[in-house]
């Protein structure tokens, strides 16, 4: 590993996590904001459901690891909510099992350390027409609807309320955007740049409002190697230097 050791934020989930650095994605935005503050680690697995997540949970988050993450952001649900395939194969996980799988994930993550914080992302809606247009040639059956996503999203929200886990209602958050079904997705399922910006704003809102010590909001965390230096850029007076260690360029989130 390289040093100095920074706080670790782990993004754990399916393709919305794996591809979170694509299309100006939410993982890339977080990495930009938390440069010199925390390492954003992606553990995303395209096509996975909560069943497969449980199979690798101990490998991704070993309890005996010397360093445990300060924050884990979890997303599973969209693939689970798919309609059951007649063959019995595929991604569908019955709702009751999905709830218990997510419960087990939360329990495991809570056991890692007293300082490990958790945020779940609920299942977002989809653009059904766009899915049929872009993905129907790849799969024999695409039975993914906004209604099924709503059901799994609400189940996730209820579970998190029961377990006192922070959760972001993506099903509602994305639909606040005008023309959300067209502007928030690339293919009807995966997030566009605009969709990712909404996700980041919701994450930052949780981090800002959470009464966690220390705070994990990017503006509250110290910058690495932030001391003044004669090697910083020289100011216009030609006599002093400007410490720009805390500058974040091209940030339009304003929070």
Image: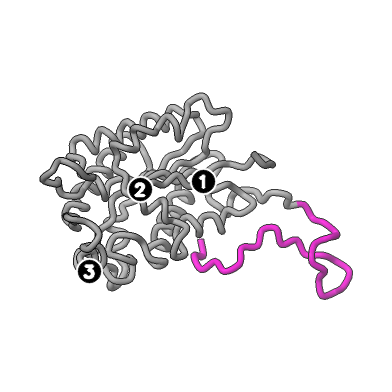
User: Could you tell me which secondary element the residue under label 3 belongs to?
Assistant: helix
Left or right of 153 on screen, residue 205: right
The reply to whether the magenta stretch includes residue 164 is no
The residue range painted magenta reads 227-255
Q: Main secondary structure of the magenta part?
A: loop
The residue identified by callout 2 is 14
Up the image or down, 165 lies above or below 108; here it is: below
Residue 133: mark in rendering: 3
| Residue 68 position in % (x across, y down) | 53, 33
Distance in Å between CA atoms under marks 3 and 1: 33 Å
| Residue 78 position in % (x across, y down) | 26, 50
| Residue 186 position in % (x across, y down) | 34, 66
| Residue 9 position in % (x across, y down) | 51, 44
The answer to whether the residues at label 2 and label 3 have Cβ atoms under 8 Å apart is no
Q: Residue at x 29, y 71 (%)?
A: 182
Left or right of 249 on screen, residue 133: left
The reply to whether the magenta stretch includes residue 244 is yes
Query: What's the coloring here?
Result: one colour
Q: Nearer the viewer, residue 135 or 121?
A: 135
Residue 147: mark in rendering: none
Distance in Å between CA atoms under marks 1 and 2: 14 Å
**In the rendered structure, which disc, 2 or 3, sits on the residue that comes first in sequence?**
2
User: Could you tell me which secondary element the residue under label 1 belongs to?
Assistant: strand
The residue identified by callout 1 is 41
């Amino acid at each position: 590993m390289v040093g100095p050791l920074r706080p670790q934020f782990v993004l754990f989930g399916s393709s919305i996590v794996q591809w979170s650095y694509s299309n100006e994605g939410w993982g890339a935005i977080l990495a930009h904001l938390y440069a010199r503050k925390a390492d954003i680690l992606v553990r995303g697995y395209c096509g996975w459901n909560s069943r497969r997540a449980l199979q690798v949970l101990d490998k991704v988050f070993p309890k005996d690891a010397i360093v445990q993450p300060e924050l884990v952001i979890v997303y599973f649900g969209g693939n689970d909510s798919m309609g059951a395939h007649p063959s019995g194969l595929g991604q569908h996980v019955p709702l009751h099992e999905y709830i218990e799988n997510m419960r087990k994930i939360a329990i495991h993550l809570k056991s890692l350390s007293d300082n490990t914080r958790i945020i779940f992302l609920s299942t977002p809606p989809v653009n059904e027409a766009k899915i049929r247009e872009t993905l129907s040639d790849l799969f024999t059956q695409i039975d993914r609807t906004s209604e099924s996503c709503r059901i799994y999203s609400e189940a996730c929200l209820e579970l998190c309320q029961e377990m006192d886990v922070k959760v972001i209602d993506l099903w509602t958050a994305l639909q606040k955007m005008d023309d959300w079904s067209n502007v928030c997705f690339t293919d009807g399922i995966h997030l566009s740049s605009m969709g990712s910006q909404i996700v980041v704003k919701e994450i930052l809102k949780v981090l800002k409002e959470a009464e966690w010590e220390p705070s994990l909001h990017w503006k509250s965390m110290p910058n690495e190697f932030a001391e003044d230096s004669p090697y910083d850029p020289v100011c216009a007076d030609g006599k002093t230097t400007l410490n720009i260690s805390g500058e974040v360029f091209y940030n339009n989130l304003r929070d």
